[in-house]
Image (cartoon, rainbow, N blue to C red):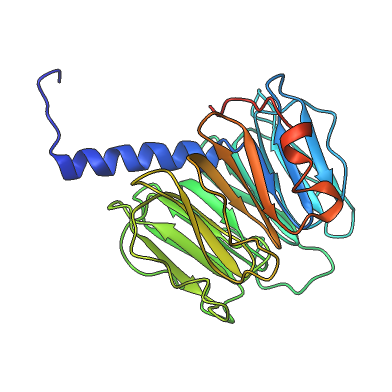
Amino acid sequence: MNNVRLSWPLLLMFNSLILSYQVVSAAVLDVGSGITCGIKSDNTVTCIGRFSATQDTLSQISVGYRDSCGIHNDNTLVCWGGPKYGISKYPSGTFSQVSVGTYHSCGLHTDGTIECWGGKNVPDYGQTIPPSGTFSQVSVGRWHNCALKTDQTVTCWGNNRHGQTMPPSGTFSQISAAKMGWHTCGIRPDQTVVCWGLDDNGQTKSPNDLFSQVSAGKWYTCGIRVEDNSIICWGNNSDGQAEPPSGSFSYVSAGLFHTCAIQTDNTPVCWGYDFHGCVKSVSEEIPPLKVSD
């Protein structure tokens, strides 16, 4: 095995798969609707904006509309927020990743199966009934979800009003469903981005750059360029959420009207609508961030 050499295209694909999986499955900073949450270096959680943080220590976090979920170091879940949608009644078991949307959540068990919960008091489109099989990532939107199979193809389920559950054929290394919206984007093994679903603000018209990570917000999308680790966003920019600062970044999270990112020195920065300090207070209150696993 020591003498095996990968060709450049295969090496690029391999590195892309590793990078994208680490980024999306071990998020230590995430945004929702008027809230930003981050995991500090001591594994405690700070949230700024609409609702407070859990007192638990976490290894990763996902923030939605009114609710958030996280994973403990022993891979068990915790969710918090209001009781309206049932997200806070989370399942038992062990998980490697969790994704919180607008009204429901899905988690990836350590055996690769998916379990979803919540969705109370909203229309039922089958969004909490996941497909069988094993997966490497799940991403939750408003009333739809998409998941990356272990063969790197994508399957989606739930509401399909705007074609958001009809992914293109082919393989992907990472996916991102708009947690409060109706579109999804994914990164191909060649690091190009393709998006599908609602395009009323140009949120699915991805540029011709190569990307290491992509994050779909409600009416816009942001991605990190491979070339220089800068961020570019496209789609709705009503509150400056699609105008990223210059710099070098390792992670980006797009929300409703604001966006946050982790710079390559592991410090957070946010832009867009500053609801209750969820943009301007982040750089003072959340660091030092936990180093992503």
Residue 180 lies in quadrant: bottom right
The residue sitting at 82% across, 63% down in the picture is: 120
Residue 99 picture location, percent across and down = 63, 49
Q: In this view, does 230 lie above or below 166?
A: above
Quadrant of the snapshot with the N terminus:
top left
Q: Which residue is drawn at 61% across and 72% down?
A: 236
Horizontal relation, residue 273 to residue 49: left or right? left
In this view, 47 is above or below 214: above
Res. 57 image quadrant:
top right
**Total number of numbered discs in the rendering:** 0
**Residue extending furthest toward the left:** 3
Q: Where is residue 242 drawn, in percent x and y?
A: 59, 62
Q: Farthest front residue? A: 246
Determine which quarter of the picture holds residue 162.
Answer: bottom right
In the foreground, 267 or 19? 267
Q: Position of residue 246 (x, y in %)?
A: 52, 47
Residue 92 seen by the camera: no
* Horizontal relation, residue 197 to residue 92: left or right: left
* Residue drawn at (76%, 45%) of the image: 280
Q: Can residue 279 be seen in this view?
A: yes
Left/right placement of residue 96 relative to residue 76 reads left
Q: Give the percent coordinates (x, y) of residue 108.
A: 57, 43
Above or below for 22 versus 244:
above
Instruction: Please indicate whether residue 26 sits to the left or right of residue 90 in the image.
Output: left
Q: For the point 72% across and 54% down, which residue is it?
A: 32
